[in-house]
Amino acid sequence: MPNLLNLLIVEDEVETRFLLSQILATRGYKVRTAEDGFQALGMMRSSLPDILLSDLNMPGMSGFELLSVVRRLYPEIRVVATSGAYTGTQVPMGIAADAFYEKASGLTPLFELLEKVADAKSDSIFSKRLPTTLWVDLEPEAASDSNHVLINCPQCMRAFRQTIEEVNSDVRTTNCRYCGGQVPYAIALAIQPPLKFGIDKSRPVMSSEALSSQVSR
């Protein structure tokens, strides 16, 4: 059981955000919430969380981009990414997270995952981290009208245009046109919309009481 660890939940779905904040608060976390990446970064300027639990598919600044920024600015934060667009327990390729939670897979796995991340030693967390991929959010209307993206080099901080032949979520690599540094990047738009926590079209949506009842299990 965590000892008042600061947890920041980033989730654009209002009901999901509220339910998670209420349930995880009862688990001993000091919880704050944000509706997108921009709001989350604003909150981090005043106080950094110990753990960041972030959805990947969000309007504004997506979780893909947020986690990439957080890894560069605040590498000490332990990050759990969550989505319904991926399956399994492995962190999807290119995503700057220490762990991954598949949405709608139940609350018990989430509780266990958060406790595992909280208890892990810092050196073991850092040793497993891969080079951070730069995620580029491409606006929907631009996907069909443009054959390029704007990339900000994390080494020299210069922005340059990169021509793309196909819009997908593959992790790619290019060299900065100014400093020559290698920049791994991917496009977030290609990921399909995620399922919501506890939502399955083949069965009724879980109520807050049903979700809360799992806390004591």
Image (cartoon, rainbow, N blue to C red):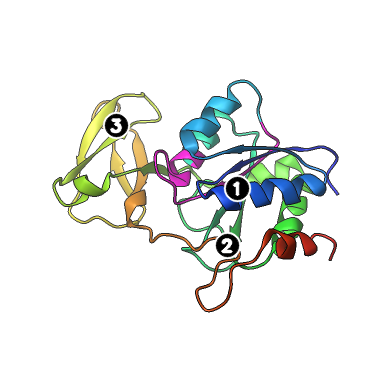
Rendered residue at 58%/73% (across/down) = 204
The answer to whether residue 154 is above or below residue 182 is above
Rendered residue at 16%/52% (across/down) = 144
Judge whether residue 138 can be spotted in this image.
Answer: yes
- Secondary structure category for the residue under label 1: helix
Which mark's residue is nearer the viewer, 1 or 3? Answer: 1
Please say if the residues under marks 1 and 3 sit with CB atoms less than 8 Å apart: no
Query: Badge 1 is on which residue?
Result: 17
Rendered residue at 74%/51% (across/down) = 23
Query: Badge 2 is on which residue?
Result: 103
| Left or right side of 145 for 102 | right
Of pointers 2 and 1, the one earlier in the residue sequence:
1
Q: Amino acid at mark 1?
A: Arg
The stretch of residues the image draws in magenta is 49-67
Rendered residue at 41%/59% (across/down) = 193
Q: Tell me the distance, in whole angstroms, between the alpha carbons under discs 1 and 3.
A: 41 Å
| Left or right side of 82 for 148 | left
Asked if the stretch drawn in magenta spans residue 111, the answer is no
Query: Badge 3 is on which residue?
Result: 180
| Left or right side of 48 for 73 | left
